[in-house]
Each structure stands twice: as structure tokens, then as C-alpha cells.
Image (tube, grey):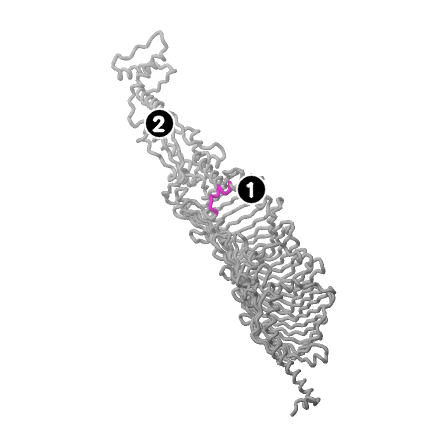
Amino acid sequence: MNIKILWSRPWIRRGAWALLALSVYLLLTGWGLPRLIQSQSPKWVAANLNGQLSLERVTFHPFAWRLQIQGVRLSAEDGEPIFGLRQLVLDLDPLHSLFSLSGRIRTLALEGPELAIHDLGQGRSNLGDLLRPLTEEQQPSAEEGAEPRVPQLYIADLKLLEGALSYRRPDGASTRFTDLQLRAQDLALAGADNQMALALIGPGGGRLSVEATASLAPTSVQMQLALDDADLTRYWPFIDDLFQFQLDQGRVDLNATLSLRRDHDHTALFLNQGAIELSGLNLSNRQSPLLTLAKARVEEISLDLTERTLAIGGVTLEQGQLMGHVSDQGLDWATLFLPAVDGQPDTDAGADAQGKPWQVRLDGASIEQFRLMLQDSLPKQPVAWVLDLDRVQVGPVSNDLSQPIALELLSRINDDASFTAQGELIPESLNAQFDLSLAGFPLTATVPYWQEQLPLKLVSGQLASTGALSLAGVSPLDLRYDGELAVRDLVTQDPTQGRDFVKWQELAVNHLGVATQPMTVQLDRVTVTQPYSRVIIDEDGSTNIQQLLGTDSGAAAAASKAEPAGDPLPLSINSIELVDGAAFFADNSLTPKFATGIEHLAGRITGLSADPASRAKVDIHGQVDRYAPMSLIGELQPLVPDSYLDMALTFDNVDLISLNAYSGTYAGYYIDQGQLDLSLNYKLEKRQLVGSNRVVVDKLKLGKRSESDKATSLPVALAVALLQDSDGVIDLGLEVQGDVDDPSFAIGPLVGKALFNAISKVVTSPFSLLGSLLEGEAPPSEVLFEPGTATLSPRAEDQLRQLAKGLTKRPGLSLSLNGAVSVAADRSALAATALAGELGFEATPDQPLTEQQQTLLVAAYERRFGVGSAPPLPEDQPPQAWQQSLYNQMLARVNLPLDALPELAANRAEEVKRLLITRLGVSAERVFIRESRLELNQSGPKVVMALDAL
């Protein structure tokens, strides 16, 4: 067939041209376009970006209008990958685009996209460096401020499949998100209510899901955001430099509804129904546990960026544990939870603060089963505190600080004590009202805080208090507490022997009021049930109290007096009641050791106050060794510098056998029997102490002597006999006084000195004591005789009569008689008596003799000196001188018996005894004559008397 004929046919020509056009179309689109894209795209990137682009394969289906690009690789200039895409599928809809005058795409699919963002530091990133040429050449819009036009583009099916996103910091910290999925159908950029769904999986398995409804003209986005089980540790390296602790474990779940609307220059952002939940959170500090938290949830979060409001429905913490440490640097929480960021404050925040103020509100917060563990290293022995927060509820809370914040707390301290608090706090004025309750707090937990100052062993003790705490301000501090207080089962011991020191069953205060403005402490009624105290004197003389204080009482007293007295504590106590108390006293410095107790101690002290004019009344009773009553009654004011005291302490019917340790050690005798009544009355006023003491001892009977080297040298038995009346009673009064400001002042030595002086006076002047018991002259301690005689004079008999009366009043006394002589006077008197017997008459010097007497005198003289030896009577002298000369010579030659003087001394003592027994009624068993013949008393012609105990 002729080609011309064929070509002349119209349908042939049309077909040929159509076929040629189709061929050209297929050549240009199916072969030329892919090669154009594959060859020119890298050149454009190289010319317009700081990077390199490679496309592995590009195909275009001319009939389906489907563009496929495989193996897309976008790298930085150094070849480091930035973006990669396994395959891009673009399925165009040219017919609909032509007829609708808009771009229409049937399918846009990105398979395996991967974006790697590297932070290069100093505000640079690999993506920023890649796009920098574009950003630098970008010119501002000619219609600045005009709303940008949204292209008329419609995508029937938008898919992003198996995507990945990675991020790396300069320090090497990195993270990677995988399984990135994005789906959108019927997406019209210029339309409204476009539906999109985005999902990705982060490192550690957390999944982010976003469902959005968006419009671009005007801009409007509604998003439902959900983050499930994200591993926080994978993201912690990016922010760990902001904190001073480490995140070891933690996962987060998040749900929220976001709304974004933009109209011209106005942007509105809303967040509703937001919720954040942390679980399995573990924080550490220097590889030591800091915080563990099973669950933390923030619910009902609402945010309005336009109105600047933030509302949170609730915050809940469950099953957590927070560890802290207190050192000389303070509590580590104060620094650990502060951002570790240096630099200047954000000035933008200050500018933003010039707008509408934010309104923040938290409806409520709760904490359940949360434990605070605190290690306090300030004491020498570190203390571990554990506070279990069983339930804490706070709220509502807002930034309107004038509104009260409610708080309810239910907790336990160290697993033993319970502590509750309920009330309100107004932050603006720092006013607060709380009802507090503490029960079972172990006082042993406080030992390390005061053990160095007071080495007392605290065995047990529990503190409880219930009351109301009010705070009215902090500058100055205006705080008040009103409530009840009790300390139960308190037992303290001295640290060396482990013996009970002070203890009680309960100390209860029915009302306690403490205030700081003004400073006052008020107690209504203090009841101490079964109080007990032990005072012990050890072998070295020190007391257990001194051992606890670490000093002697004298030094402590001097130190306290050297310190200037401050203002007295404004304390008032309406009454202190003692119920069934006891005390124990032991003195181990004695031989044998002494111990006694006071039982059934009861009574009260009322009206104790810091008011200098007030006087507290004391009325306390008890029993010593079960049978002897004791009482302490009077008034006192111990709370002011010029203390006042007017007290009477009495002990009745105290069995003196219980005091054998003291009597044996200091008196030198043990006691066989006796009872003591002791009345002590002391008055202190204007720093002057005056004491009036009365000691009454009944039926005292001394036993055997002790061998104590501390015994007094005074004749104790004699003192007892002198002081004990006919009824067996010793009634002794002791007056003491002293200046309490005297550094050497001590009440014990004052009383001891007064007692020693009283006994010394008695034993050194016993006859004076007898005289004080009688009316008239006191009997002398000796009876005088005429020389050479043993005959009592009438005066001597009267004196002995007084003595006999005194002995009747002191039946415990015995009397010893010691006859004495004057060798010269008594010898001369005895010789004169013997010579008168020889002469037959008594010669006196001033009386002349008769002739017969002169004859007898001369005869006797010559018998002694020889016949004719007597001188004649001078005629020119008076006869008295002659006869006195002869008499004196003869008297000098009288030879007395050797026992004449001892016999005379004995006769004198016998005469005194005879008179006392036979005529004055003194029992013979009470009068004794001392031996005078072997050791003659030559003190004079008398009988020396001495009193002694029977």
C-alpha cells in the first residue's frame, strides 16, 4: 500500500501524530523526567544547600502519574547522613487537578524516612548548617503581616511508614525514635477538619500517638496526645546537666487534648484533660538511693495561654521513699533539687510578667504511703529518722496567697509514734491554725542530741501531746500552742552502774500554753504518777548527780553564781500533784553501807509562778522505810533571782536502827534502839537563810562501839546521857543562818557545825547543863573540904543536893568521885591533929598556954629532942613566941603514916558518896569512887566529880 495514500487519510495522520505525541510523552515523562530529577536534584542541593543528595532510583509511570523515588540520601558536606528515605511514592491526579484548578494527589507515601539531627553546640546543628543558605537568602515578604496563602492542595491518602528520628548532642548523648507512622486521608490544606494520625515508638518501647484535626486557613489544630510507657532514662542524658542527681529508672504516661488557633496576630493555645503519670521512678545521688516512687499522677490539667490560667485537678504520690542527709552544710535536699544552671535570670520572663498575671490553681494534692528517711550527722552519733506519710492531703492551692491552704497529715515517726496535723495556712500573712496530735514518740531517739552534755542513760520514755498550734506572724515570731502533754514510762539510769536514777509512770499536763508574744509558759495541772528518784553517794564521796553533771556541786554552784542572772522564765504552774511516789537514798561511803527509802510520796505544789510577789504552796507527805511519816509543808518562790523559801520538813518515828551506818561511821557507836522525830524549818529571804531545826530522839540506846576512823572524838555516850531526860527523850534545837551569796555557802556544813557546837558545849560543861535543868545555882564539879578533914560542910551538902536533883532528871548519867588532897595543907593539918593527941590539948599560936600546958609541952619536947633540950621561957618576951617555937619544932618532927594522905582522899570520896546515897536518894549503881591511893590526886582538899554515861 502506498504510504502517501495512507498518509492522506485523516485518521491515519491523526493516529500517527497521536502516536508520535504519545511516544514523545512517554520518552519525556517515563525516561527523561526521572533522569532529570535524578541528575538535577543533587546539583540543586549542592548549589543551594550545604550538603549532598543522592537518589538511588527514580521512576515515573506516565499513565498512572505515579512518581517513585528510591534510596534518597541527604548528607552534610562531610558526608554525614542527615536524611534518608527508602522510597517516595507520589500518585498524582492530573485530571481532577485540571478540572478543580487545584493540586490533587491520590497518594503520597514516604516509606522508611529517617532524620538524624546532630547538635553541634553553640546553637548550631547539622540540619541548620544544611539549610543555612536558604535561610540567609530568604527575603521578608512584601506584605509583611499579611496572612500567608494556603495552597489549594488535596491529598487523598497521606502515609508515612516505618519512619525514624535520631538526635545526638555534642557530648555523645543520643536517642532514636522508630516506627514513625503518619496517616491522613482526604487532606485538604485549604480545607477544614483534616484528620491525621501520628504514631512513633521511642527508645525503651514508649509509644507516642497523636490524633489531630487541623485547618490551615485559619490555623486551627485539635490534637489528642497519648504517650504510653515511655522510658525516661533514655532521655535523661539530655537534661542531666541541669540537675545534681541521677535518674536510674522511670517511665511516663501522658494524655492531653491540645487546641491551637491562630487568627492574624492572635494565637490561642488550650490544653484540656491533661494527665501525666510517672511510675517506677528511681533517683540517686552519687550512687546512693535518693528517691523511689511507685506512682506519681497529675490529673485534670487545663491550660489557657490566652487567659494565662493553669488549673490542675489533683496531684497524687503513692508508695515512695525519699532519702536525705543533714550535715554541717545543711539538708542536702536544699541543693539536690535545685537546678544546677549558672547564668543570669531570663529577662524575657520579666517582660512577660508585665502582661496579664497568671492564675494558677491546684484543686488538691495527696500523698499516700510515702516514707521520708533522714540521716542526721550533726550529733556525734548519727541519728536516723523515718517519717512515714500514710496520708497527706493539701489543697486547694492557688497563686492567690491570701486564700487559705488546707492541710491534713497522717504519719508515723520511726515506726512507733503517730503524728497527725489538720488545719489551714494563709501564705500571704503567714497565719496558720493547726490541730496537732503526737502519740508514742520515743524519747530515746533524742539521746544523741544531748548525750554529750548530760551522760544520762535513757532506757525508755514516750512523749504524747494533743493541741492547737496557731501562727500569727514570723517577724517577730508570734506562735502559740495550747494542748495536753504527757511523758509516759520514763526510765533513766546512771551510765556507770546501770541503776535507776529518775523514773515515773506518767507525767501528765492537762493544759499547756506556750506563747512567744509575749513569751509565756502556762501549765494548769501537772500530775506525776509513781515518780521515783535515786540519790547515791559512792565510796569516794561523790554522788550520782555529780557524776552526771561531770563536776562537783561546789564548783557548779560557784559557776552558776558567777553567771549573770537573766530575766526569769515567764512560767506559771497552777498545781503539781505527786501520786504514789518514792525515793531511794544510799550512802556507800559508810561502813556498813546505808540505804533508806521514802514511799507513798504524795501531795501537791500550787501557785508556782514567775511573779516575784507570788508564793507557791507546798504540801507533800510520805513515809520513810514504810512506817515513819514525813511531810514537807510551806511556801517557796524558786523562779526569780531573789528566791524565797519558808519550808518545814518533818520526819516522825524514824527507826534509828536504819541509821546505824551513819552512827557507826561518825559517832563511833551503833544503835540498838531509838526513834527520831526531826523538824526542819528554813526561811530564805533577801538571800539570807535562817534555819530552825528540832531533833527529838526517843529511847535511844547505844550499842557496841565501831572501829571507824571517821568517828568523832567527842564523848558521844556522855552527850546522849546528858541530853536524854528521865523519859528517855532527847530534845535538841539547832539554829543556823547564812548568806547564800557566800561562795562557801552550803546548808549541810551549817547544820553539821551547829550540831557539833551543841554537843561540844554539853560534854565540856556537863554540870552547867544540869544547872540549866534546875532552879537555882548549878552544882559545881568539885566538893571542897577543910584541910586534914573528910567532913562535909553545910554548903557542900547543899551543892550535892542540887547535883542529886540533876541526876534524877538525867537517869542515864553516872557520877565518879575522885578524892584529892593538898600535900602541904592536909599534911600540916594531920600533923597538928597527931601532936594535939600527944599533948592532950590543941595549941593555937595566938593563945597563951597554962602552966600545966607549958609543962606538958616541955615534957613532950624533951621526949623528942632529949632531956634538957627545951629552952627556958624568956622572961623579957611574951610566952606565945616561945611556945610557938617549941610547937613548930615538934610539929615538924611528927611522923605521919605513909597512907595518911591517900586515906584522907578516900575518906572524902566516901563521905560524898554516903551523903548522895543515904541521904539524897541517888542510886548506888550510879555513883562510883575512883582509886586514889595508887595515884594520889594532889589538886587540893576536895573531891573532884565527873559525869559519865551509864
Decide: few, some or many residues near mark 2? Use Cα within 10 Å; few <14, some 14-19, many ≥20. Answer: some
Residue range of the region highlighted in magenta in the rendering: 549-558
**Residue lying furthest bottom:** 1
Q: Which residue is mark 1?
A: 683
Which label's residue is closer to the chain start, 1 or 2?
Answer: 1
Q: Position of residue 769 (x, y in %)?
A: 46, 36
Decide: few, some or many residues near mark 1? Use Cα within 10 Å; few <14, some 14-19, many ≥20. Answer: some
Q: Which mark is residue 938?
A: 2
- Residue type at mark 1 is Lys
Instruction: For marks 1 and 2, give the one nearer the viewer.
Output: 1
Question: Can I make out residue 125 in this image?
Answer: yes
For the stretch drawn in magenta, the main secondary structure is helix
**Residue lying furthest top:** 876
**Tag 1 secondary structure:** strand
Q: Look at the image and say whether residue 538 sits in the magenta stretch.
A: no
User: Which of these two is toward me, 832 or 209?
Assistant: 209
Q: Quadrant of the N terminus?
A: bottom right
Residue 97 position (above or below residue 903):
below
Q: Look at the image and say whether residue 552 sits in the magenta stretch.
A: yes
Residue 735 position (above or below residue 873):
below
Q: Which mark is residue 308?
A: none
- Residue type at mark 2 is Gln
User: Which of these two is toward me, 354 or 858?
Assistant: 354
